[in-house]
Amino acid sequence: MAMAIRAFLLLFVLFLSSMKPSFSLYEDQVGLMDWHQKYIGKVKQAVFHTQKTGRKRVVVSTEENVIASLDLRHGDIFWRHVLGSDDAIDGIDIALGKYVITLSSNGSILRAWNLPDGQMVWESSLQGIKPSKSISSVPANLKVDKDNVILVFGKGGLHAVSSIDGEVLWKKDFVAESVEVQQIFQPLGSDVVYAVGSDASSQFHVYQINVKNGELLRHNAATFPGGFSGELVLVSTDILVGLDSATRSNLVTINFRDGEISFQQTYVSNLVGDSSGTAALLPSKLPGIFAIKTNALVIFIRVTSEGKLELVGKINDPAVFSDALLISEGHQVFALLQHGDGKIHLSVKPVHDWSSDLLKESTVMDQQWGLVHKIFINNYIRTDRSNGFRALIVMEDHSLLLLQQGEIVWRREDGLASIVDVTTSELPVEKDGVSVAKVEENLFEWLKGHMLKLKGTLMLASPEDVAAIQGMRLKSSEKSKMTRDHNGFRKLLIVLTRAGKLFALHTGDGRVVWSLLLPLLRNSEACENPTGLNIYQWQIPHHHAMDENPSVLIVGRCGRSSNAPAVLSFVDTYTGKEINSFRLTHSVVQVIPLPITDSTEQRLHLIIDVDHHAYLYPRTSEAISRFQLEFSNVYWYSVDRDNGFIKGHVLKGNCIQKLADEFCYDSKDIWSIVFPSDSEKIIAAVTRKLNEVVHTQAKVIDQDVMYKYVSKNLLFVATVPPKASGEIGTATPEESWLVVYLIDTVTGRVLHRMTHHGSQGPVHAVFSENWVVYHYFNLRAHRYEMSVVEIYDQSRADNKDVLKLVLGKHNLTSPISSYSRPEIVTKSQSYFFTHSVKAIAVTSTAKGITSKHLLIGTIGDQVLSLDKRYLDPRRSVNPTQAEREEGIIPLTDSLPIIPQSYVTHALMVEGLRGIVTIPAKLESTALVFVHGVDLFYTRIAPSRTYDSLTDDFSYALLLITIVALIGAIFVTWVLSENKELRDKWR
Amino acid sequence: MGFSLLRLLVLGLCLLAASSWSLAFQSDELLIDDEEFGLEGGVQSKSHDLGYTRSQPSTTTRKRFSDSDSDSKIQFSLEHAFGDSDFSQTGTFTARLKTWNHGGQTLTKLRFSRNAFTTEDKEKFELLLQSDDFYRIRLPSNVLSPPGKDFVISSVKARCLPRDGLDEHFVIHTDGVNILAVNYGAPGACPYPRQMKLPAKWSFNSHTVLKNSEQAPRAPIFTEEILGGEAGEGEVVKPPERSFWAKYWMYLIPLGLIVMNAITQAMNMPEEQAAGQSAGQTQQPAVVQRGPTSNVRRR
């Protein structure tokens, strides 16, 4: 009986799996056409594992809110946790020798993780009202038997937390005093905690608190006129150093020994001599020494026990130094790193003796890695019992390196954890002519390879041979070649990272083909805080310019605000060399790639600045002449989310400005939509992808033709009341509604407007062909929902008369104008969906014939592929026979989540931010690139690979069959000849 | 009593001129539809959503009194601009502001009166027609306190408007007392190579539509009963009757081919017989042995 049930179940499952259009993989197919890379992001803080017996590890926290334990030998990740995007890590430390303590979310969450395996041990949330600076301090002399406390300052209060179970032992609030606490510290071996800070009236306060119970022992205050600028640096247990806020060139030493606060001022110029201008205090944790930065120098200054300042050393500016490291009792060292002629010079010095060096090494560095941003050092015992040092350094491109004995032990390309934008580039076409030397080499390699393979099959191969065979297979495999392939699977993914570095990743195996740190996106005096914005396809060689290499345009701006001047950079995608770059005088808010190219296939781009001027690029006279032809047909729109406007613009004529610029155009508003500020706030605006191809213009519905409304100028906008624009649960269903709009961006016509009552954002939407799918939260049903709106054109409905088509009385070929009043019909339907969503994309194929799948980045950092047919507005409870034949799925209230249809199968793309689909040349296949903290790439075939044979297709069987058939033909031919002969002789 | 009647009408006629019943005076004018019905019904006839008024240039809007305190009459003005010129007033919209019991306010019964073009305007418009430039209009975004946050602007290429007269079509999207957007354009098509054409009459033929947001369809909610019922229903549902051709085309086409084949065979047969062989087609194999195509026949 049980057998029968099991068999039935198995059959049922088989039946289901055959029905659902999923493209699940077999276990051994994982990694054949997909790759996954794990990253952590730019390291903010690193703590070395000091346990003598334990494995060598380093724990790091990063700007991507990742906490990870890395192997010091290879740089591999032992364990890793990605905290939420709103849970930034403020500090990490190691407590009790076995816990990693992290403080995050502006000092409100304290967590302990088990050091060996990364399991969370405890978590405690610290209450407070006032947001403030957050500092955590774990006393250094932790012994396991004592109940040690962790002191945390956050949310305007000082908390003492037990490091064993995370219980808050006591709390001292500083909110009432309105003192901004700058530092907390506990002198070694004492029971007193010091909290120092200043208030608004430039009073300087020192609190002494009993570490056992939080009792305030002593409070001193003294006024320093003018107050301090920026941070205070703790130099020793009773001396702080700050800069005065008035001139910023006056160092103030604050001595609070025995409760008496005294100030002492020293001019920087007195110490340094020729210094002019302002100085900046560098954050440091060095006993007795602090560092300041003036013009191009980093100056180290020692504070003597009497509070006197004396100059210790000067080094040239691009230099970093580490915190002090205790190597033996009373002996502290720190590392200093300087740049010079393509090398970095690392020196480790004792804190008390500037002139001597414990270690001096030089290492050659790649120019593309930029400057060193941070250094963390660690010591180890060498084989000759002396002290050795290793340094973990963070570079400008966010990569992480380990230096030991003057060499780079390993390097992690962690800039790839923060991708800003992605585009693709084709690879070069394979050349026919191959040089003789190459052939010879290839022949030898080929012979060697075959020998190895033979050995492998005969079980004679040693482990090294096996590894060599494996490596050869990977290398020789078609997928990682550097040339274009027939199916268009091999491409370069050009990605721009937050560090301003451009990478080219090969889609075959995900390796970095080239990387380029864009010079204009590096921090410099001319351009502070540069940010990379987008990548655009600048030149795609086609018919005219086959010999040119394709290139991309990178748009960035100097500074964070939108009116900062823009920078442009043009990069060759084959070589990774920068062709050209400009620092522009105007800003950039919008870049419009025009559908016009010049004679060298360079695409014309319009850059719109904050003042609504449009600038044409490339700046050639040919570009102008081509652009003039389409001048009156250029329309664009802008969405002002803060003020609730959507406006349409056209070009008016050349700029009327101080100096004539024929590439600059004025614009004027031709339409505007104004959302009432009390009831509607724009939360999402989505358009169709520009390069999308629509194959079928019509759809057969109930044996009737409906024409899709496939205008490229459609904008989907979603608004919610300002009250409901916060997180889910902040508004009641009555005061929350979601209004969606479909707007024609040429005329500003609202084509469709629809209200979802009791719903709220966040809205994630995707627009493709003639439909929009969007995801939101339904407060009434307490569930997420996905809705679809399909748009059909009624004005072309008359065309389905065959007679008219034959007689040529149709309007299919007449140009479509946006100024004609559209007659559209929309169909929509909503479905429940279980997951909350991080990103939605849709598959795109070369010709648009293949059916579409939605790619949904779920909250679990996976990518789910959902057939668009599930989101068909025509689904009904009982589809008729005709509808079933069309492939309409019976109506269900929620969308199914089929475990096999996860594109990411068993993997997770931590911190998922975006999904990019790229059409391959093969119509059935689309390439999918998912980026977040991790990267994932695969290719999917939404309707299965109907246009190619699968990899496991047996060519041998086909060949054998053909041979057998030919043989059979010959045999039967001979037989029939014989028979005929016999018959004739009869 | 009057109130319940009003309620009933609201339900029954979908807000159609509900308030007018409570008024003592009823206009005999052809009124504009208060609201466009949703598009849920699928295909919509063109005239359905179009209430139109032919506005006389010098219409004086009749003073209407209101004995119901939930209604009030408001006016807001239409302004226009030729190309890049400044906006000037060119017409007035009159509407009733209906206050609902739950506090919401909606605009109903929109009427429009347009001023005629002055000679100066005509000249400007002709210039627009020649340069194929934009004719722009704007409305306040809040009808109670114009202009509200800002004006809502819409524009159209001037060459789209002239037909016999000047045809224009307004779609005003409202949300309570706020005007979100106005769509302005020709009522019909405006084919792309826009021809320069002067209107025969310089009077406007205006169509106005007021649109409110429509309700989104709810996600279907299934209860156990429905699902159970569905399973039982399964066999009851009969597939729709299909035409003879749709059912049997796969048999009919081969049949047709066979028939055609037979006909061509029959046509060829007399010729073959004329070729002189006395032997029939269906002879014994022994006889045919000497025939030229013996092998083929025997297979």
Image (cartoon, grey):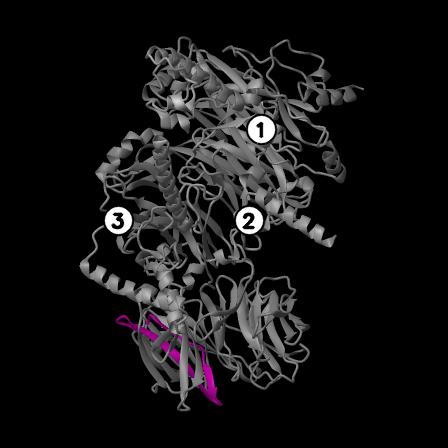
- Classify mark 1: helix, strand or loop: strand
Mark toward the viewer: 3 or 2: 2
Whether A279 is drawn above or below A405: the answer is: above
Question: Label 1 is found on which chain of the structure?
Answer: B
Q: Which residue is mark 1?
A: B174
Stretch in magenta = A317-343
Give, as a three-letter code, the residue at label 2: Ser
Label ID, residue A549? 3
Co-location on one chain, circles 3 and 1: no
Q: Is residue A845 above or below residue A460?
A: above
Label placed on residue A901: 2
Chain letter behind tag 2: A
Q: Position of residue A980 (x, y in %)?
A: 36, 33
Q: Residues within 10 Å of mark 2 (few under 14, many from 20)?
A: many
- Report the front residue among A256 and A590: A590
Q: Chain of mark 3?
A: A
Q: Position of residue A984 (x, y in %)?
A: 34, 31
Mark nearer the N terminus (3 vs 2): 3
Farthest residue in the front direction?
A986
Measured Cα–Cα span from mark 2 to mark 1: 43 Å
